[in-house]
């Protein structure tokens, strides 16, 4: 038997309360209507179903719960006027509305579980990248590896803290940022002439495409990392100067490549990427290069 995405315990809570409501609706005595009012208010305010809606933070589910509260208050007013039939109709509608709210919260719970699993997988990827970065740093005798790791660890701690507090979207955003930084750090350690020679490109055009991709990666870092670092403020003049130089060099490289002069375009792109690295560092974000 499927439970439409929410846990059996919550479903059982709803069924019990609704079962009580349906049983009480068979008769129309004042005392039984009072019992029904108590059962429905418990369903809305303190049941496991109500708790699931609260913890899901699903806006639609929360809104439907508010609708159920409105219907319950209308039932109370009708009951106070002695209109038992109307009161019970409102209570039945309130119960059905809570059913809808729980279904919405259940879907959100399923989505949230997927987000958590994706976060864990991305965290594993970052950890693997950092292990690779440490190994390559030893090979390359990179003296900045410890500082790089400290910067990454601080961001990972922040992402984990947000994740643990239920701020899943913000946590994933930071984790994705760290993934890009770690990946770029490895590219930089293996980059430059040593990597180009080891790859043995078939043509200069192929080598140019590789350098173009490296430049694109660093431009993405400028867009993502610097905006987060400076919280929407403009870069300082020195950082902006590096960015402008990089942009001009990129444009120059594309013109050189368009005429088939790939060898020159490659050198120009490398210069452009170096300017982007300086811009990122100038904003206080360390990456190797």
Image: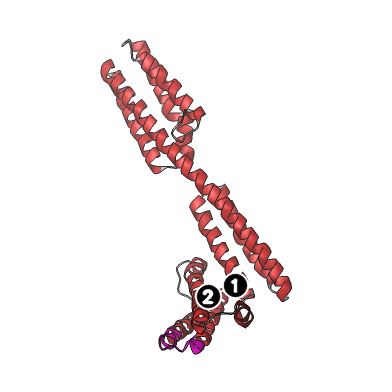
- At horizontal 67% and vertical 65% (from top left) the residue drawn is 132
Q: Is residue 90 above or below residue 144?
A: above
Verify whether residue 256 appears in magenta.
yes
- Mark 2, Cα crowd under 10 Å, few <14 / some 14-19 / many 20+, is some
SS at mark 2 in the image: helix
**Labels 2 & 1 near each other (Cβ < 8 A):** yes
Percent of width and height locating residue 115? 51, 48
Quarter of the image with the C terminus is bottom right
State the mark number for residue 3: none
Q: Is residue 9 above or below residue 282?
A: above
Q: Which stretch is magenta?
A: 253-265
Answer with left or right where residue 256 lies relative to residue 91: right
Q: Please indicate, yes or no, whether residue 286 appears anywhere in the rendered image.
A: no
Verify whether residue 153 appears in magenta.
no
Q: Is residue 166 above or below residue 257?
A: above
Q: Is residue 94 above or below residue 205?
A: above
Percent of width and height locating residue 248? 44, 85
- At horizontal 37% and vertical 11% (from top left) the residue drawn is 31
Main secondary structure type of the part rendered in magenta? helix
Percent of width and height locating residue 288? 62, 74
In this view of the protein, which residue sits in the foreground, 31 or 216? 216
State the mark number for residue 214: 2
In this view of the protein, which residue sits in the foreground, 32 or 5? 5
- At horizontal 44% and vertical 85% (from top left) the residue drawn is 257
Which residue is identified by label 1?
187
Earlier in the chain: of badge 2 and badge 1, it is 1
Percent of width and height locating residue 35? 40, 16
């Amino acid at each position: 038997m499927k439970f439409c995405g929410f846990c059996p315990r919550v479903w059982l809570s709803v069924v019990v309360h609704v079962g009580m409501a349906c049983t009480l609706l068979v008769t129309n005595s004042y005392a039984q209507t009072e019992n029904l009012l108590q059962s429905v208010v418990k369903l809305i305010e303190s049941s496991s179903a109500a708790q699931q809606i609260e913890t899901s933070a699903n806006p639609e589910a929360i809104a439907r719960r508010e609708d159920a509260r409105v219907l319950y208050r209308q039932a109370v007013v009708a009951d106070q006027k002695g209109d038992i039939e109307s009161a019970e109709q409102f209570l039945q509608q309130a119960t059905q509305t809570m059913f809808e709210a729980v279904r919405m919260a259940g879907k959100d719970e399923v989505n949230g579980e997927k987000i958590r699993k994706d976060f864990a997988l991305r965290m594993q990827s970052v950890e693997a990248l950092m292990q690779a970065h440490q190994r390559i740093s030893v090979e390359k005798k990179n003296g900045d590896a410890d500082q790089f790791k400290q910067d990454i660890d601080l961001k990972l701690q922040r992402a984990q803290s947000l994740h643990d507090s239920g701020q899943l979207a913000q946590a994933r955003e930071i984790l994705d940022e760290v993934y890009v930084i770690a990946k770029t750090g490895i590219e930089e350690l293996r980059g430059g002439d040593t990597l180009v020679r080891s790859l043995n490109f078939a043509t200069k055009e192929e080598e140019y495409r590789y350098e173009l991709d490296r430049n694109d990666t660093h431009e993405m870092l400028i867009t993502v990392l610097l905006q987060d670092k400076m919280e929407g403020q403009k870069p300082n003049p020195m950082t902006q100067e590096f960015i402008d130089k990089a942009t001009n060099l990129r444009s120059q490289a594309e013109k050189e490549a368009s005429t088939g002069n790939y060898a020159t375009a490659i050198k120009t792109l490398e210069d452009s990427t170096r300017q982007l690295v300086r811009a990122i560092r100038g904003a206080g974000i360390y990456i190797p290069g």
